[in-house]
Amino acid sequence: MSLNASKMILKVFGIISIISGILGIILGILAVAGGSIIGAGAAGGEIATGSNLSIVVAFLGIGGLTIIILCVVDLLLGIFSVRAANDISKIMPAWVIALIDVISSLIGVGTVLVPVIQKTQASDARQIASAIIACLISILIFVAANNIKKAAGK
């Protein structure tokens, strides 16, 4: 892969990562806020409490925080990728975040495939395909960042 192709990959996927990171952070904040509102409504007696309500509130809170953390990594990856595409001497932060993104993508593929392999969950082809595509994109970004890192002599 040429240096110009690596720069283009980092720039294009960096911009996409910035947009998806911002949208994901907003959705994560909404999930946490929604869980807080439901919990406050249940505590105030405005919402009927049930055995599943605490599970829903916990799921929204923990899920929302997880989404926020992963989307902050996505946002940082985008910012550092665009910076590195413009100036190859600034590649190391993008390379590190790209490595973290590859690891989290591999974990995501594992969490989708393990229940299917163990036959504890029915296979959802869209979910599996989405996880695999996200992992391949992460690997592509890492390979491009690694190519720029080598060209920069770092």
Image (cartoon, rainbow, N blue to C red):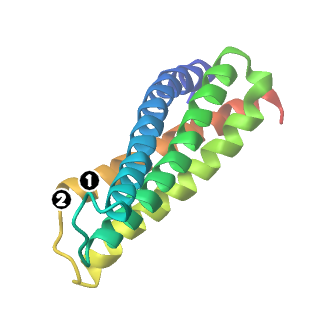
Quadrant (top left/top right/bottom left/bottom right) for the C terminus? top right
Q: Looking at this view, is 80 or 23 the one in front? A: 23
Tell me if label 2 and label 1 are in contact, CB under 8 Å: yes
Q: Is residue 52 above or below residue 40?
A: below
Q: Quadrant of residue 144?
A: top right
Q: At 73% from the left edge and 17% from the top edge, which residue is drawn?
A: 87
Label 1: state its secondary structure. Answer: helix
Q: Is residue 53 above or below residue 103?
A: below
Residue 36 shown left or right of residue 45 in the figure: right
Q: At 59% from the left edge and 18% from the top edge, which residue is drawn?
A: 4
Q: Looking at this view, is 11 or 67 the one in front? A: 67
Could you tell me the amino acid type at mark 1?
Answer: Ala
Q: At 31% from the left edge and 65% from the top edge, which residue is drawn?
A: 56
Which numbered circle lies on residue 63?
none
Q: Residue furthest right?
A: 154
Q: Which residue is mark 2?
A: 125
Residue 79 location in percent, x, y? 62, 26
Residue 34 location in percent, x, y? 36, 49
Residue 14 location in percent, x, y? 53, 27
Q: Looking at this view, is 53 or 22 the one in front? A: 53
Q: Which residue is mark 1?
A: 129
Q: Residues within 10 Å of mark 2 (few under 14, many from 20)?
A: few
Residue 113 location in percent, x, y? 32, 70
Q: At 37% from the left edge and 50% from the top edge, which residue is drawn?
A: 37
Q: Residue furthest top?
A: 86
Quadrant (top left/top right/bottom left/bottom right) for the N terminus? top right
Q: Residues within 10 Å of mark 1 (few under 14, many from 20)?
A: few
Label 2: state its secondary structure. Answer: helix
Q: Is residue 111 above or below residue 147?
A: below
Could you tell me the amino acid type at mark 2?
Answer: Ala
Residue 4 shown left or right of residue 95 in the figure: left
Estimate the spatial distance between the alpha carbons at disc 2 and disc 1, rounded to whole Å: 6 Å
